[in-house]
Amino acid sequence: AQSVTQPDIHITVSEGASLELRCNYSYGATPYLFWYVQSPGQGLQLLLKYFSGDTLVQGIKGFEAEFKRSQSSFNLRKPSVHWSDAAEYFCAVGRINDYKLSFGAGTTVTVRA
Amino acid sequence: KAGVTQTPRYLIKTRGQQVTLSCSPISGHRSVSWYQQTPGQGLQFLFEYFSETQRNKGNFPGRFSGRQFSNSRSEMNVSTLELGDSALYLCASRQDSGANVLTFGAGSRLTVL
C-alpha cells in the first residue's frame, strides 16, 4: 500500500525567508506525486505535480519540488515566502490507473512578519 | 470555467439523522471523488465515480454511500450519523484522461451534535 509521511507538523518561517517542506513516500513503483495547499475554510489547491521526466518541477506561486527516487522524497521549496503563504500543505501520492490519492498528515506553515 | 461546486457549504445534524451532500464537477470532467478530512485522521479517500459507476472505494462503513448522475454530478449520503462523522467532506473531479490531477471543491463542513 502506498503511504506518505510529512515529518513536520508545524513550521514557522519569517517573511522573506526560504521554506522547505519535507515529504517521504512509500510505494513500490514510480509514483505520481503532488503538493496541495489548503487555506482555512477552503478546499485543496494544486501547487505542482510530478509524473515523470525532469525531477525538479515548478509550480504555481513560486513553489518548486524535487523528486529523489533514492530517498523516496518529494520536498517542496520556496526561496522567499510571503505572508499569504501561511496555510496547510499536503503531499500526496497516487499511481497509474489508480483513482485515489493517499495524503500525508499535512504541514501547517506560519509566516511571521 | 467554473470550478467544482459543493453544496451545502455548512450543515449541522444530530446523531441518527442522515445527510446528503452534492458535488457538481468541472464541465467535461467525468470522474468525481470524495474525501473526508478530520483533524484526527486527516484526508481519507471515500469513493470515486466515473460514468455513474463506483470504481474505487475506501475503508468506510456501509453508512457512507454515493452515486453519480448522467450529467456527472455526484451525491454522497451518510446515514445514521455519528459524532465521529463530523468532518469536512471534499469532492474532487478530473478528466479521466492523461494525468490524474484532481481539482477540489471548497468542501461541505458537517457538524454532528
Image (tube, coloured by chain):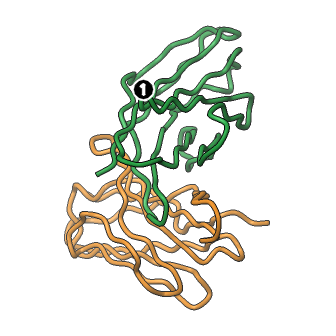
As drawn, B39 above or below B87: above
Of B74 and A70, nearer the camera is: A70
Of all residues shown, which one is farthest toward the bottom?
B70
* Amino acid on which the number 1 mark rests in the picture: Gln
Q: Quadrant of the C terminus of chain A?
A: top right
Residue A20: x and y, percent?
55, 19
A113 to B32, vertically: above or below = above
Residue B88 percent coordinates (x, y)? 42, 54
Q: Residue at x 63, y 65 (%)?
A: B4
Measuring from the top left, give residue B90's x and y in whole percent.
48, 59
The residue singled out by tag 1 in the image is A71
| A82 sits to left or right of B18 | right
The green chain is A
Instruction: Specify whether A110 is left or right of A5.
Output: right
Height in image: B58 above or below A78?
below
How crowded pointer 1 is (Cα within 10 Å; few <14, some 14-19, many 20+) is rated as few
Give SS at disc 1. helix
Examine the rendering and report whether any part of residue B73 can be seen: yes
Q: Residue at x 62, y 34 (%)?
A: A55
Figure label count: 1
Q: Measured from the top left, where is residue A87 in percent x and y?
A: 56, 31
Residue A83 found in image quarter: top right
Q: Residue at x 71, y 10 (%)?
A: A16
Label 1 marks which chain's residue? Answer: A
The extreme right residue here reads B1
Side of B50 where B97 appears, left or right:
right
The answer to whether residue B105 is visible is: no
Which one is in front, B80 or A99? Answer: A99
Residue at image point 64% right, 70% down: B97
Q: Nearer the viewer, residue A57 or B88?
A: A57
Q: Colour of chain B?
A: orange
